[in-house]
Image (cartoon, rainbow, N blue to C red):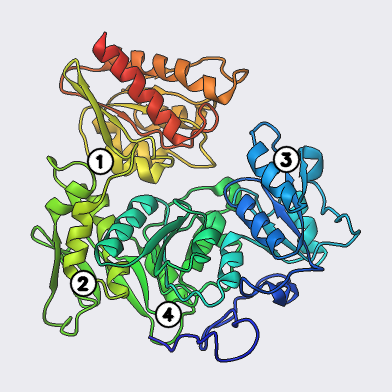
Amino acid sequence: MTETLDPTAADGPPPVLPPGAEPVDYPNAAAIPAALHGPESSLAGITVVVTGLGVSGYPAAVHLAERGAEVIVVDGDTARDRSEYEAILAVFDVDIRRGPEHVSEVPTGRSGRTPDLVVTSPGWRPDQPLLAAAAARGIPVIGEVELAWRVRGANSAPWLVVTGTNGKTTTTTMLESMLRVAGLDVRACGNIGAPLLEAVLDPDAEVLAIELSSFQLHWQFSMCAEAAAVLNIAADHLDWHGSAEAYAADKGRAYTNVRTACVFNVDDPATRALVEDAEVIAGARAVGFSSSVPGPGELGVVEDLLVDRAFIPQRYSAAAELAALADVARASGTPDAPAAPHQVANALAAAALARAVGVPPAAVRDGLRAHAAGGHRLALVAEHRGCRWFDDSKATNPHAADAALRAFDDIVWIAGGLAKGAEYGDLVAAHAHRLRAVVLIGEDRAPLRSALAAHAPEVSVHEVDLPVSELAPAERGGPVMDRAVDLALAAARPGDTVLLAPAAASMDQFLDYAARGDAFARAVHERAEA
C-alpha cells in the first residue's frame, strides 16, 4: 500500500489527492475554492448553490452555512414537506428557493455575487438547465462525494466503496457487519445509512462502508478509496446517463486512485474492463471474486466454502477458509434454503473489501452470521393456497429481476413500473419457460408487454389498468397492488411461486420500492387471513 497522508505535516488544508494519485479531468476543477478543504476553514465570502433539499442537499447546506458560506438552496419540488429542514436552515440564514421557476438558471446570491460553486444532489441530471448553465459559465459543479472527500480533513478513516447495478445495499451491510465483528467502529453511509458528509465528519469513525450509486459517482473526481468493488454492470438508468457506456464509465469512477484493492466480478467481464482501464495508486491490486473455484488473487467457492486466495501470503498454493455457504444463506434471510448465487457473490465482494483492511477470516464468517437481511429482497411473505408469495420489490431493473426469476420455476410474475430506458427482451426470453402467467403493473406497461408478446406469446398476461395518476403517491399503491394480487391469485396453481420482481422503478405508482413491497405484503396477508 502507498504511504498515506500526514495532514499535520504542513500548514493549511491537506491536499485532495495523496502522493501517487492521478488527477481526473473534470470541468472547472481548478475553480473549486481551496478553502473548502478540511472542515475547519472559514468559507466567508464564498457563495454556494445547493440543488435539492433532501437527504444529501440538506446536510451539505448546513455544513457550508456553518462555515460561513452564503448558501442558496434550490429545489423544484414543492410537494414534499421540508418544513423541519427549512426551519433549521433559517437559523443559518440560508436562502431557500423552492418551485420549478428556480431551477432553470444559476441564481445570484443576496450579495449579488455569482456563485463560486454548485453542490448538486444525485437526482439532478447533468443536462438539467441550472447545472448546464453553471458549467458553461465556468462554475464548478460537484456532488456530495466530492464535497465529503474534500472536507474530511484529518479524518483518516479508510473509504471502502461498493457500487454496481445490483446488490449494493446487501453487500454494504454485509461489509458493515464484518467490520463491526472485527472490532472496528464502522459507519455504513452514502446511499444508505448516514449521509456521507455526516459520516466523514464523525471523529469516532474508524472505517466507512460506503454504498454509492452511479449518480453519486458521476459528480466526483478526486476520491481515493482504500478499496472499491463494482459488483456487476447491466444497463440501467439510461434515461439519466444517456448511454450504457456513460453509465458504466460513472460506475468505474469508484476505482480511480484506489490505494489497495480494486474488487471486480470475475463472472462479469464489464467489471474487469473497468479495472483494466482504471488509474490507481501504485501497489493497488485487482482482486476478483467468483462463484467458482478461485485462482490466485481471487476469492471464490470450493465445495461448500467461501475461500480467499488474494489476501494470504501463500495464495499460489493455498486458500484461507472464510465462511460456509450456509452462512451466506443465513445472512440472506433464507437459512432453510440454499444460498442464492447472487447472494454468494455479494458475500464474496464484501469479504474482499473487509480483507483489504485486514479483517481476519473468522470476522468474515461471524459477520455473515450476524447480518440482518434487508427487506424486500426475495423475502417470503406467505404461503397461501398452496403457493409461495415472494417480495423482491428491490428488483428495480431487469438485471435484478433476472436473479430473482432464476431462483424458481412455475412463476406467476408481477412486474412493471418505470422502465428508465431498459429493454426487456433478453430477460423475458431467458425465463419464458418458467412463467405460468404475468401480471403487469405500472403506468407504462408497453415495454414489458411487447417483450412478452415477442418472446413468451404462450404466457397469459393480465394488466392492472387503474387511473391512479390523479391520486397522491401515498394513495396509489393500495388499489394497484390489491388488483395485482387478485389477478395473481386467479392465475396461480398449487405449487406455483408468485413473485413480485418488478424489473422497474416504483415512483410512477408508489412512494418507493419499499412502499411497493409493503403494499404487496399487506394485500397477500389480507387475503390469506380472510
- Whole-percent x, y for residue 131 in the image: 74, 55
- Whole-percent x, y for residue 150 in the image: 60, 72
Quick check: 515 above or below 56? above
Q: Earlier in the sequence, mark 1 or mark 3?
A: 3
Residue ID at (45%, 57%): 189
Q: Quadrant of residue 518?
A: top left
Q: Which mark is residue 76?
A: 3
Helix, strand or loop for disc 4:
loop
Mark 3 packing: few (<14 Cα in 10 Å), some, or many (20+)? some
- Whole-percent x, y for residue 69 in the image: 76, 63
Residue pointed to by mark 4: 259
Comparing 178 with 285, the one in front is 178
Asked whether residue 394 is in view, the answer is yes
Q: Earlier in the sequence, mark 3 or mark 4?
A: 3
Q: Quadrant of residue 289?
A: bottom left
Tell me whether circle 2 and circle 1 mark residues in contact (CB < 8 Å). Answer: no
